Image (spheres, grey):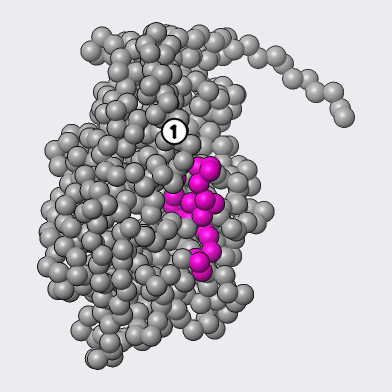
């Protein structure tokens, strides 16, 4: 190998650098910057999980690209002062931190932000305050709202991820308290017992009194106490302030991420409504065959080929190039020739991984303009087709017992792990065991005679009745392979009383039919010739979502004594057609 002439690069590192907030609280950060040159744009990463959780942050690539890097602990975490109250300080703290970065003597005044999940949420929280120095954000697997899509989904509490996250943060909170000299032994025993048996933890009732987490983190009970989207969520969330965002953004999501809907909504909303033309033109979207924490190209029971991983598309390099361009660094890549509105931001507007074909494709918008919205109808006897139902097709029935809920089997999950069952893990998983239950209805098409591409938002319309005072309806799109495997593609849930929206619960009258629209979020899936489409309908997806007791009362305080067995009716006649609406892309 030839000898390389590579000069040494000196980097200055400062740990626990104090950053004062407007209320006088001091947050602390690790600051890395080249020892010579400058001033530099700043890459700010705000983290609520402590230093070990950001060791994979792109510090070296950002330094190589000419950035100073600031890794800051959120309020009440790591070495930062104050109390950690989930989401409550992130908007003002984020804006103050951006302005601090912009005015440092080694900064050129341009600040970008980066990070996934909570680290993405703090980016939107800060950006919604419109700090003048913020020039770009890179939110990865990030919801559009704290209520919709994070804590609740069409009225159902996202129990799987909520308990998993509160368990993690409760452990960290106890560690901080122990380090401060407090006796945490009793709470630690309670938390360890909770973690030792995930199935029992998820089954605990009432939810509001779940051991350990309900006492350690105030957000557990706050979230459950505010089932309706009310003033609490309006004051907390950045959703309705996103039109103040003036920074280009590179949104990264996964088809099997629980926050996929938020990633897509953030991109689409900001492309239309961001505060400046530069920000609107500078929205970019990448969605791969990924879960919330895994971008290897393997999800669930499928390997998506050589090009399915983040390494295959050099995702980190794409992110760094985006940041360089958006902050005006010399030598940054420019947009592809002719790309509408590319301006100073590189790359196509949209990059999607098309599953089934297992290829990446560039697009100009989301949803795709050439979409052919196509209805496939549920029929008596369990068939599914594009033909409309008849006038007198009889309804389908099943019995739902919340004491024996339909179990979660893959999908966009983030459930507390081992020793829980493998079926709780995210991604496409075989549904046959679930479909064999008497409380699951399956509607299946004939084998496809040609490939069918479905790329875009997916929804199911159900005309249904229940004997209970309240219930849930779930729907799942399934790819049935010629060998019989039935792999889940995407799914959704609606709580009956929230069928008209999260602000206005409307009780149902037992026995009366209503129309329900179930948001299955989106996918990009080619159903191959010889495969069949299937829609599964049930009334639970547990523990991904909580169990609806069926008595019309809030699920947060329900016990097993409140559980009501529900007789469910699904209509699929000409007057009450139940169907799935697919975004078909011409081949």
Residue on which the image places disc 1: 193
**Left of 583 or right of it: where is 2?**
right
Q: Is residue 525 left or right of residue 308?
A: left
Query: Neighbour class for label 1 at 10 Å: few (<14), some, many (≥20)?
Result: some
Determine whether, in the image, residue 329 is placed left or right of residue 163: right
The x, y position of residue 494, in whole percent, is 27, 59
The part of the image, by quadrant, that contains residue 6 is top right
Q: At x 41% / y 49%, what residue is drawn?
A: 258
Outermost residue to the right? 1
Residue 416: x %, y % from top left:
46, 41
- Residue 393 lies, with reference to residue 131, above or below; the image says below
Judging from the image, what secondary structure is the residue with disc 1 in? helix
- Name the residue nearer the viewer: 332 or 65: 65
Q: Judge whether residue 314 is colored magenta.
A: no
Between residues 51 and 275, which one lies in front from this camera angle? 51
| Residue plotted at (29% across, 44% down) | 205
Q: Quadrant of residue 484?
A: bottom right
Residue 516 seen from this side? yes
Can see residue 169? no
- Depth check: give the residue in front, 439 or 67: 439
Residue pictured at 47% horizontal, 58% vertical: 409
- Depicted 364 relative to depicted 137: above or below: below
Q: Which residues lie in the magenta part?
A: 410-433
Q: How many marks?
A: 1
- Please identify the quadrant where the N terminus is shown: top right
Q: Confirm whether the magenta stretch covers residue 420.
A: yes
Q: Is residue 410 left or right of residue 468?
A: right
- Residue 280's spot in the image, x, y percent? 33, 44
């Amino acid at each position: 190998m030839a000898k390389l002439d590579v000069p040494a690069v000196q980097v200055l590192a400062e740990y626990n650098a104090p950053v004062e907030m407007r209320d006088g609280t001091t947050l602390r950060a690790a600051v890395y910057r080249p020892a010579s040159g400058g001033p530099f744009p700043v890459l700010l990463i705000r983290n609520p999980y402590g230093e070990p959780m950001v060791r994979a942050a792109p510090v070296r690539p950002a330094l190589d690209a000419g950035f100073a890097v600031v890794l800051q602990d959120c309020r009440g975490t790591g070495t930062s002062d104050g109390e950690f109250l989930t989401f409550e300080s992130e908007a003002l703290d984020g804006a103050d931190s951006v302005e601090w970065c912009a005015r440092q003597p080694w900064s050129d005044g341009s600040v970008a932000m980066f990070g996934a999940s909570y680290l993405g949420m703090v980016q939107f929280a800060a950006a919604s305050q419109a700090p003048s120095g913020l020039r770009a954000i890179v939110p990865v697997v990030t919801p559009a709202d704290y209520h919709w899509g994070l804590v609740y989904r069409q009225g159902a509490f996202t129990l799987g991820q909520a308990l998993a996250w509160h368990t993690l943060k409760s452990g960290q909170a106890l560690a901080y308290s122990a380090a401060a000299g407090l006796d945490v032994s009793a709470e630690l025993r309670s938390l360890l017992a909770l973690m030792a048996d995930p199935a029992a933890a998820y089954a605990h009732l009432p939810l509001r009194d779940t051991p350990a987490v309900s006492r350690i983190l105030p957000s557990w009970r706050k979230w459950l106490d505010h089932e309706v989207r009310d003033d609490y969520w309006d004051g907390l969330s950045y959703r309705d302030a996103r039109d103040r965002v003036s920074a280009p953004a590179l949104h990264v999501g996964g088809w099997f991420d629980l926050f996929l809907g938020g990633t897509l909504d953030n991109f689409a909303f900001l492309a239309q409504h961001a505060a400046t033309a530069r920000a609107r033109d500078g929205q970019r979207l990448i969605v791969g065959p990924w879960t919330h924490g895994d971008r290897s190209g393997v999800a669930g029971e499928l390997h998506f080929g050589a090009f399915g991983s983040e390494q295959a598309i050099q995702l980190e390099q794409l992110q760094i190039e985006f940041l360089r361009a958006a902050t005006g660094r010399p030598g940054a890549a420019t947009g592809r020739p002719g790309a509408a509105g590319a301006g100073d931001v590189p790359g196509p507007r949209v990059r999607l991984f098309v599953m089934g074909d297992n290829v990446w494709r560039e697009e100009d918008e989301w949803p795709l303009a050439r979409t052919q919205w196509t209805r496939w109808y549920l029929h008596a006897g369990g068939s599914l087709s594009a033909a409309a139902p008849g006038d007198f097709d009889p309804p389908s029935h099943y019995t739902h017992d919340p004491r024996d809920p339909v179990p979660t089997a893959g999908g966009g999950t983030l459930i507390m792990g081992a020793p829980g069952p493998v079926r709780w893990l995210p991604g496409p998983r075989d549904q046959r065991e679930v479909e064999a239950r008497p409380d699951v209805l399956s509607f299946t098409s004939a084998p496809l005679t040609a490939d069918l591409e479905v790329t875009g938002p997916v929804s199911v319309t159900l005309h249904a009745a229940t004997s209970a005072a309240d219930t849930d309806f779930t729907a799942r799109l399934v790819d049935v392979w010629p060998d019989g495997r039935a792999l889940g593609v995407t799914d959704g849930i609606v709580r009956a009383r929230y069928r008209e929206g999260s602000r206005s619960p409307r009780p149902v009258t037992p026995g009366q039919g209503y129309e329900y629209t179930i948001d299955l979020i989106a996918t990009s899936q080619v159903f191959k010739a010889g495969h069949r489409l299937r829609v599964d309908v049930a009334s639970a997806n547990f523990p991904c979502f909580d169990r609806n007791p069926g008595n019309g009362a809030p699920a947060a305080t329900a016990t097993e004594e409140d559980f009501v067995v529900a007789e469910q009716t699904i209509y699929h006649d000409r007057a009450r057609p139940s169907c799935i609406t697919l975004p078909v892309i011409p081949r």
